[in-house]
Image (spheres, rainbow, N blue to C red):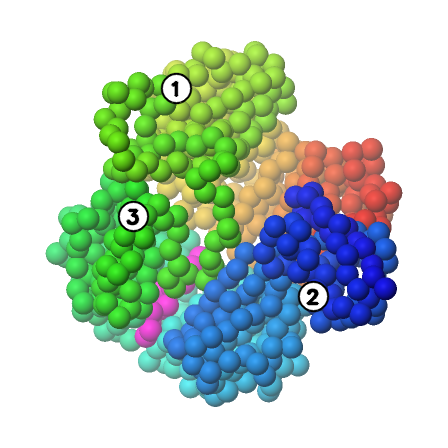
Amino acid sequence: MSITVDVGLLSGKTATVKAGLDEEVGALRRRAQTALGVGRGRLVDSSGSALDACAPIRHTRLQNGDLLTLHINRVQVEACRLSFAAILGDGCVVTWGDADYGGDSSAVQDALKNVQQIQGSQFAFAAILADGSVVTWGSASDGGDSSAVQEQLKNVQQIKASDFAFAAVLDDGSVVTWGNAACGADSSAVQDQLKNVQQIQASGRAFAAILADGSVVTWGSAANGGDSSAVQDQLKHVQQIQGSQSAFAAILADGSVVTWGSNSDGGDSSAVQEQLKNVQQIQASDFAFAAILHDGSVVTWGHAAYGGESSAVQDQLKNVQQIRASYCAFAAIVGDGSVVTWGDAAYGGAVQDQLKNVRQIQVSQSAFAAILGDGSVVTWGKNAYGGNSSAVQDQLENVQQIQGRSTETPGTDQIALGVGRGRLVDSSGSALDECAPIKHARLQNGDSLTLHIHRVQVEACPLSFAAILGDGCVVTWGSAAYGGDSSAVQDQLKNVQQMQGSQFTLAAVLADGSVVTWGDADHGGDSSAVQEQLKNVQQIKASGIAFAAILDDRSVVTWGNAACGVDSSAVQDQLKNVQHIQASGQAFAAILADRSVVTWGSAAHGGDSSAVQDQLKNVQQIRASYCAFAAIVGDGSVVTRGDAAYGGAVQDQLKNVRQIQVSQSAFAAILGDGSVVTWGKNAYGGNSSAVQDQLENVQQIQGSDAVFAAILGDGSIVSWGQSSSGGDSSAVQDLLKPV
């Protein structure tokens, strides 16, 4: 006997598949993959449960006509020193390499199902499954055997690995460690401090954890940064930590840096401490650090032979966009697309004349690979580590991505033929003007061009739409007076990178950092008064009828309706080192580099924060409703300001807040224990009492104008707010399991 079922993808594409009752689910899945023309995935039934690929179909309760979903995920690859592990599309794992050091997972293969993430130490792997449990394999003494802590490894959110140990953060913010005791596996001395942990970083033999209040706890080998007592009083309001083999470097909220660990290997940054201000990002080689400052310059310290000394190239390190590090060297992409390298030349520190118009760099332990604008590849460093690509150089054309140490590989994207609109780029990386006659383009027979494809992006105003096409041009439609007609600026709308819409106007940021606006002139559609200032724009935010733009020097330019936030003159001298901006209906709030907040605009909409200014310190995130703001600060509490009826009233329950979402006139906060607190206008989701007992183990919330929908840990959905707008999901509740 056989059974016939329909199998669909999330895209909506379906196929009808037939299989015998005595066959395994895996056979049904393989036929579905073939019929749908996709790679490996996992079959999910109508209740949201994944089917066991090894189970006979007759034991699955499947019936003729059932609708199944085939979930496809991208392949992810993680590397140990001597082996690899890949998560396939169906959540299974394939390993290869040295059998004793992670290349053989046969002993745990049956347990490696629905794998979400893998982390590798030097000689072992740890995998997090969908249910939050962990499976380990490889060298038992180096983290491959987690049996001693297996009962504790539940609801795991994140795993980090030192060279020979692992540390897992659980959903309650506690930490479990295992592996080699001398390398961070023994956290007993600090276990009572490891509460409300937000993230963990590792050096070669130690760990550092950032807590919710911005403080840091360390453990493991003292020589590798496991003892931070000498700088403990400085480790406050920590935003990010980077670890080398023997030291750590922490970026604080004010952009300064604190280091500890082996002095000669980056743990002592005193020689450059005065330069370490407004730090945006830090990268580490094995024994040195490199920091990118907000002005694009670079500061280095640590072991000179490992890249800690950059004086020979310092005058070239300007407008740095990205840094990559190998074992002994660094490579930086600067603004003009060229590359600056320093460190041990044998490990990738030798400058290459070909390195022009570089798009991306990837790294192995001792070599670098750069993708140029024309899709070709340049490699350098140790031959045995990929530094010499001459054997395959003629194949390295139109390269889109390279996998080195990175943990993900791309899916199978469409290329070349049968694609949507894109922009043609010549071998020098320059985009060709599609309006130019070909005879004027200097093209010759046999030239190789690259067609750059981007997804269409759509931005909406209440009365119009604008779409960025694959070639960077813009199409608009809707009410002509309120953004639907862009004909007056159409010639300027080329190479558009992003758009932002207010109530009646649209603003586009171009590739050169300039801005084009159109729509209602009185409400932001006319930016001529500030056009000369709108250069090197990084980000734009819109209130109801005004705009605010962050420039690359982190200053702010505003325009639009004066009553709605366009007049920032009263706070202009405070608007320095701005990192992010949020907007309510008629006001703006900016988070600065030191995590303080500056507000302006209508006081009734949150533009006056003076009453709570002393509380707005170490701000992590801001959300805005129409008339109010809510800020999560470092200790997990929330500060609100604006119209209390729209969400401005502070709630006593708002402690250990993980995330806030917003409707038009209400807020919903997910706490650390997975419960939810709501406030604001009842009709807009501010009152969740009717579903409060269901709001447990909430993973994510999405807000519309008048409704919230929460995804729970089991994949089901709970909604509340205005019933007619989706707040009542009872009619489809049986279909919403799980998402």
Q: Which residues are magenta?
A: 238-249
The residue where tag 1 is placed is 492
- Residue with the mark numbered 3: 376
Q: Quadrant of residue 330?
A: bottom left
Identified at 54% across, 24% down, the residue is 466
The span from disc 2 to disc 1 (Cα, nearest Å) is 54 Å
Question: For this rendering, which residue is in front, 59 or 79?
Answer: 59
Which of the labelled discs sits on residue 26, or is there none?
2
Name the amino acid type tagged 2: Gly
The residue nearer to you, when weighing 58 against 710, is 58
Which residue type carries mark 1? Answer: Gln
**488 inside magenta stretch:** no
The one nearer the camera, 175 or 117, is: 117
Above or below, 371 against 103 in this view is above
State whether residue 483 is above or below residue 335: above
Alpha carbon of mark 1 to alpha carbon of mark 3: how far? 31 Å
> Mark 3 belongs to which amino acid?
Ser
The single residue placed furthest to the front in the displayed view is 1
Label 3 crowd (10 A; few <14 / some 14-19 / many >=20):
some
Secondary structure, mark 2, is: helix
Q: Earlier in the sequence, mark 3 or mark 2?
A: 2
Q: Earlier in the sequence, mark 2 or mark 1?
A: 2
Q: Quadrant of residue 170?
A: bottom right
Q: Is residue 489 left or right of residue 68?
A: left
Q: Residue at x 39, y 36 (%)?
A: 451
Q: Nearer the viewer, mark 3 or mark 2?
A: 2
Whether residue 328 is situated above or below residue 587 in the rendered picture: below
Q: Position of residue 420 (x, y in %)?
A: 50, 33
Percent of width and height locating residue 683: 79, 35
- Label 2 crowd bin: few (<14), some (14–19), many (20+), radius 10 Å: some
The vertical placement of 334 against 132, above or below, is above
* Percent position of residue 373, x then y: 30, 42
